[in-house]
């Protein structure tokens, strides 16, 4: 629920509008303008500190300035075909993530609704969840070689086992009463499943996809750092060999921006597909 | 004829400290068209009894007959309204109300006629296409009652439907419900912990006590209908309330004493 600041009438002298009262009251909303200034300010602050550091160190090899990184990024795109690497990484992410989601969402829903399915799948999945996906890389290289299927499998492992348990929890949380109402209106088990149970889970499932998408990036880069011909990760590795910190930083920022874009896309899809959801998450 | 016949229903759970008796041999009959209220403290098993009548849970002993048929499974002949409204957030108010008819494959035009009528009756005009998230608690519960009525059930089972509403809204809802009941004359089994609510709404009141849940007293409410806000101010209303309060007070004291004795 949005918290609205109590109307502070300037006419009431008993209500002082001091700095402490406005900004240091716990959980109290601050003026919208201040919020914007703080948000922009934080960005300016980070870039400023970076710039200052670069000026103090005066070693563009290891601490390039923000301006230098922007120039390098443009150079990477125009002369080094960096967009190609971005494309490869994006392809792997999308393929691995879609394959993981296609398996995890149905299984998670079944595990959340049927105790028999849950009892069968939960123990192994819970155990594997604690095995880091990156630890599987050497094994997968042995089994699958260095091709695309190896990268996609890493992402799949990283996403699937987390996502399936999240979806299971979501399904498990669907209130009994929601289903019971349908039964007392004459619905069959199947009708309750696809007309009540499934739609009740959708918004949160999309939320879970959004969160796990972020993790997929981590696994992809690790896989590409270990062994890959193309991709942002392999680009970073090559840049390191040539002592090009500026290129590494430019690549990392590119990943961040891509992550932000996918996250925003998920948020937009969520808002368009589920206009009825009460709490709007950003 | 839509009669609810509860015969020797007992409910026992296997708890951590041995067997817990939630309901102990409860028998009561709600004749066709009667508004029956069950009043009792929380944890006395009154909701459990309603779930048994709905066919959502199976009792350890005994059975519930609705129209002579045992309630082994839930069905459209027994509409239920829960305290938590349980509207489907992804459906508009109208689609929520039409949920039952839709399952029964009632033709679209007829479905629409039913929902329009109920939307008007439940004072939800203008909100037919709204999602539940914009409704107030009272409106949500009105929509939920409309949804239960749209299924045209033989009997209506209501589990503390106004328990989550504030006092003013609750009063308005009670008045609306008596009006609706006068119109449809459904057989109603209504569970509440609010004594005044039970007296205002019911033809008969069953006072339940807890641990084990059993019916302590049955009380016929002889207040004339239609009942309105003025009913609450009447002398007879006060008498009935004192009577019920007296019984519950006595039972509560006994419960405290037996707890002390055990300690």
Image (cartoon, grey):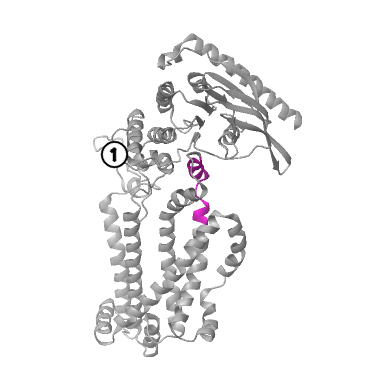
Q: Quadrant of the C terminus of chain B?
A: top right
Query: Considering only vertical position in the picture, is B244 above or below A122?
Result: above
Would you name the residue on which mark 1 appears?
A7
Q: In front: B117, or A7?
A: B117
In the image, what residue occupies the spot 44% across and 49% down?
A195
Residue B74: percent from left, percent from top:
54, 39
**In which image quadrant can residue A113 be found?**
bottom right
- Above or below for A98 versus A198: below
Foreground: B59 or A168? B59
Q: Which residue occupies the extreme bottom position in the image? A: A242
In the picture, measured across the screen, residue B219 lies left or right of residue A224, that is right
Residue at 28 percent across and 39 percent down: it is: A8
Magenta stretch secondary structure, dominant: helix
- Residue A134 in sight in this render: yes
Left or right of A45, for residue A127: right
Q: Is residue B40 visible?
A: no
Nearest the viewer among B80 and A57 is B80
Residue A173 on the magenta segment: yes
Location of residue B87 by image quarter: top left
Q: Is residue A31 left or right of residue B182?
A: left
Label 1 resides on the chain identified as A
Above/below status of A220 relative to B75? below
Which element is circle 1 on? loop
Q: Is residue A259 magenta-colored?
A: no
Span of residues in magenta: A168-183
Q: Position of residue B174 (x, y in %)?
A: 43, 24
Identified at 43% across, 40% down, the residue is B100
Say which quarter of the image contains residue B130. top left
- 10 Å crowding of disc 1: few (<14), some (14-19), many (20+): few
Measured as percent of width and height from the top left, residue B123 is found at 33, 29
Frontmost residue, B120 versus B113: B113
Residue B58, percent across and down?
63, 39
């Amino acid at each position: 629920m949005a918290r609205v600041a109590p109307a502070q009438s300037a006419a009431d002298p008993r209500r002082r509008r001091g700095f402490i009262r406005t900004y240091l009251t716990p959980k109290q909303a601050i003026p919208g303008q201040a919020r914007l200034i703080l948000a922009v300010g934080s960005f300016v602050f980070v870039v400023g500190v970076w710039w200052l550091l670069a000026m103090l160190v005066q070693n563009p090899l290891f601490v390039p300035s923000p301006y230098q990184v922007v120039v390098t990024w443009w150079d990477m795109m125009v002369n080094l075909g960096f967009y190609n690497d971005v494309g490869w990484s994006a392809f792997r992410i999308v393929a691995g993530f879609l394959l993981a989601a296609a398996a995890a969402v149905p299984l998670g829903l079944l595990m959340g609704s049927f105790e028999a399915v849950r009892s069968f799948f939960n123990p192994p999945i819970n155990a594997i969840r604690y095995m880091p996906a990156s630890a599987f890389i050497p094994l997968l290289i042995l089994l699958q070689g260095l091709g695309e299927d190896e990268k996609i499998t890493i992402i799949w492992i990283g996403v699937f086992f987390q996502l399936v348990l999240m979806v299971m929890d979501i399904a498990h949380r669907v209130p009994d009463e929601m289903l019971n109402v349908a039964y007392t209106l004459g619905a069959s088990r199947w009708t309750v499943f696809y007309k009540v149970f499934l739609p009740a889970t959708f918004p949160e499932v999309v939320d879970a996809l959004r969160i796990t998408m972020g993790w997929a990036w981590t696994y992809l880069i690790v896989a590409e750092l270990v062994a890959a011909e193309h991709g942002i990760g392999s680009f970073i590795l090559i840049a390191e060999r040539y002592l090009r910190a500026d290129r590494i930083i430019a690549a990392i920022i590119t990943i961040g921006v891509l992550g932000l874009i996918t996250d925003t896309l998920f948020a937009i899809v969520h808002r368009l597909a589920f206009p009825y959801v009460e709490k709007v998450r950003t | 004829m839509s009669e609810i016949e509860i015969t020797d229903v007992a409910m026992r759970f296997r708890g951590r400290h041995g067997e817990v008796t939630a309901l102990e041999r409860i028998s009561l009959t709600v004749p066709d068209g009667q508004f029956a209220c069950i009043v009792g403290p929380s944890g006395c098993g009154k909701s459990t009894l309603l779930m048994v009548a709905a066919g959502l849970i199976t009792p350890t002993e005994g059975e519930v007959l609705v129209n002579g048929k045992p309630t082994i499974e839930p069905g459209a002949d027994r509409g239920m309204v829960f305290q938590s409204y349980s509207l489907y957030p992804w459906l508009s108010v109208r689609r929520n109300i039409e949920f039952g008819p839709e399952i029964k494959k009632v033709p679209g035009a007829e479905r629409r006629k039913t929902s329009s009528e109920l939307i008007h009756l439940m004072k939800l005009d203008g909100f037919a296409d709204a999602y539940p998230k914009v409704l107030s608690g009272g409106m949500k519960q009105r929509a939920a009652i409309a949804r239960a009525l749209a299924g045209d059930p033989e009997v209506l089972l209501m589990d503390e439907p106004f328990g989550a509403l504030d006092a003013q809204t609750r009063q308005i809802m009670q008045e609306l419900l008596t009006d609706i009941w006068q119109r449809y004359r459904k057989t109603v089994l209504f569970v509440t912990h609010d004594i005044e609510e039970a007296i205002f709404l019911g033809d008969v009141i069953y006072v339940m006590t807890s641990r084990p849940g059993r019916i302590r007293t049955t009380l016929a409410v002889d207040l004339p209908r239609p009942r309105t806000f003025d009913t609450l101010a009447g002398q007879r209303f006060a008498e009935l309330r004192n009577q019920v309060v007296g019984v519950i007070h006595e039972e509560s004291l006994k419960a405290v004493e037996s707890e002390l004795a055990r300690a």
